[in-house]
Image (cartoon, helix red, strand yellow):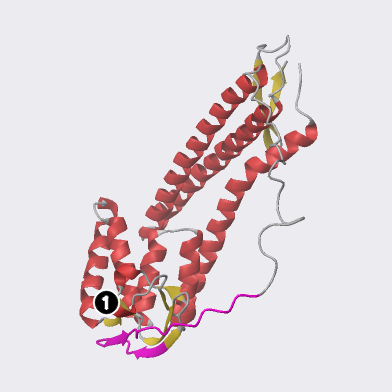
Amino acid sequence: MTRLPLPLLLVLSLLGAVAPAAHAQNAAQADALFKEGKRLMGAKQFGEACSAFEASYKLDPAITTLVNHADCREKNAQYASAWGLFLEVDRQTRGDKKHAALNRTARDRATALEPRLSYLIINVPDDSRVDGLTITQNGQPVDALTWNRALPVDGGEYVIEGKAPGHEPWQTRVTVAPELDKQSVDVPKFKSVPAPEPVAGNGGTGAGGGADADEEPVPVDAPTGMTGKRKAALGVGAAGVVGLIAAGVFELGARSKYDEAAATIDDELQDELYEQAQGKRSAAIVFGALGAASVGVATYLWLTGGRAATETDGQALRVVPAADARSLGVALTGSF
């Protein structure tokens, strides 16, 4: 019977716990940012509040965070952003009976905002479309498919730049009012830049100028056969995938319970839902850790199992969970 070395087992245990622990940490940070956003909203510090909601949603994309982010952008007079966020809430909750009221609210808010939007058009005439032309808006690339189209934007100042190889760059600024405004920018015909004169020097390849054309490629060893270790790797890896899938199912269930808890106003029911969500998240962490550890073991077996088969190949190998108060992992027993 052979056991994996203790250092390797510890490493695999840590790897298995990293992903679930990181997710739990993200959820905790997202909750803190959400509460900070609500506090800043109450203080009417809308700019900072919107940033907090946006950061929270990136860490944990909860629908309640998205709704508050949309509401914050509207209160901060960023009507185009608010409109887009309410449309996203509508898209995510469409057909969901649990969020039917939220879906109606998002649609109504988006419909009310649309007549108030401001628009910006970046006109690029045909004679300005040189090869390699790129247009940016405040440093962000503007897709060519959106050129010459009126697109909703938040109020503020925009820097429009155009660049193309072999041509002089171009830049302009335009200010758009927060609502009911329509501005346009015309991209001019670009001026060509004279090509630089060639620099005198030795051309081609000389001594030390390149790789030896006669150098033969280094032969690569042919892959070895399916040894006992690699057969075990497939089995352990399959078990790991099942564990990760189970972790995902429990995590989705936990998120659903968290959303239900956030949406209810009954304190007793909310506590019960939070408790159920915590139970599902704990199960997700356990299955995720075991699954990731199994995948790590499978990877180790596959990478080290390429040598020629020995007389002990094919003997039974078993994956045994190894857990204590400080770590979680698996031990591999058997002969190989």
- Residue 173 versus residue 125 in the image, above or below: below
Dominant SS of magenta comes to: loop
Mark 1 residue type: Asn
**Quarter the N terminus occupies:** top right
Does residue 318 appear to the left or right of 258 in the view shown? right
Q: Point out residue 94 in the picture as x, y percentages from the top left corner.
A: 25, 55
Crowding at dot 1, Cα within 10 Å, few <14 / some 14-19 / many 20+, comes out as: some
Extreme right residue here?
6
Residue behind mark 1: 148
Residue 277 within the segment the image draws in magenta: no
Residue stretch rendered in magenta on the structure: 172-199
Does residue 173 appear to the left or right of 102 in the view shown? right
Residue at 36% x, 67% y is 67
| In the foreground, 267 or 7 | 7
Q: Point out residue 285 in the picture as x, y percentages from the top left corner.
A: 57, 42
Q: Point out residue 312 in the picture as x, y percentages from the top left corner.
A: 72, 11
**Quarter the C terminus occupies:** top right
Is residue 194 visible in this depiction of the protein? yes
- Residue 315 versus residue 172 in the image, above or below: above
Label 1 SS: loop
Residue 179 within the segment the image draws in magenta: yes
Residue at 53% x, 39% y is 283
Residue at 43% x, 45% y is 252
Does residue 63 appear to the left or right of 285 in the view shown? left
